[in-house]
Image (cartoon, helix red, strand yellow):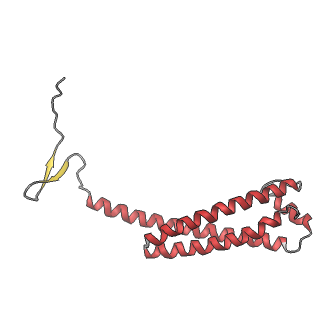
Amino acid sequence: MQSVSPMNSLRGEQTLMTSLLEVLKQEQAHLIAADIEGLTALTVEKTVLVNQMAVLASQRHSALGAAGYPAQESGMDAWLAASGDSDAPALWHEVLALTQEAKELNRINGMLINRHMSHTQGALNALRPQTQNANHFYGPSGIATTSTPSRGFIVG
């Protein structure tokens, strides 16, 4: 039986993070091109990757706790110092670097999404009537008319 070690999940986290970065780059290309269908397809893939990464991080935290270290990110430094695995520090630092790159890409993608939403809201506002106290309708002749709320009687 293979011993439970933070290293077991770390390799998987590196692979998943590399995949997530590729998806985020594709997402950015779709955002720039305003390709909504492409974005929709990537959303499912991105969600699956993030969920898988959360599972692996949880497994790594459990392995850290089982080895006597804090079961969180801060426990990695102590585990790395004591592990004796010469590949572990470089792999951990690569995962951290990939994570930082993914956070930055996600931030930029969020800005692009906000920009698209702002343009869309501006277009919707341009289509709305400027007067907010009256309701505008098109009459039978096709000319805009204003209708104010009527006060009807309630018979009861």
Q: Is residue 73 visible?
A: no
Q: Is residue 86 left or right of residue 13?
A: right
Please identify the quarter of the rendering in which residue 79 is found. Answer: bottom right
Up/down of 125 relative to 154, above or below? below
Residue at 46% across, 75% down: 32
Residue 145 position, x and y percent, is 13, 52
**Looking at the image, how many numbered discs can be counted on the residues?**
0
Classify residue 124 as left or right of residue 13: left
Quadrant (top left/top right/bottom left/bottom right) for the N terminus: bottom right
Q: Nearer the viewer, residue 67 or 92?
A: 67
Task: State the residue in front, 124 or 91.
Answer: 91
Q: Quadrant of residue 71?
A: bottom right
Where is residue 76? Give x, y as percent. Answer: 82, 61
Q: Is residue 12 left or right of residue 50?
A: right
Task: State which quadrant residue 99 falls in.
Answer: bottom right
In this rendering, does residue 120 appear at all? yes
**67 to 42, vertically: above or below:** above
Q: Position of residue 30 (x, y in %)?
A: 48, 74
Q: Residue furthest top?
A: 156
Q: Quadrant of the C terminus?
A: top left
Looking at the image, which residue is at 28% across and 62% down? Answer: 126
Residue 112 location, x and y as percent? 48, 68
133 shown above or below 57: above
Residue at position x 16%, y 25% from top? 155
Most extreme residue toward the left, as rendered? Answer: 141
In the image as oriented, which residue stretches furthest toward the front? 1
Q: Is residue 78 rendered to the left or right of residue 31?
A: right
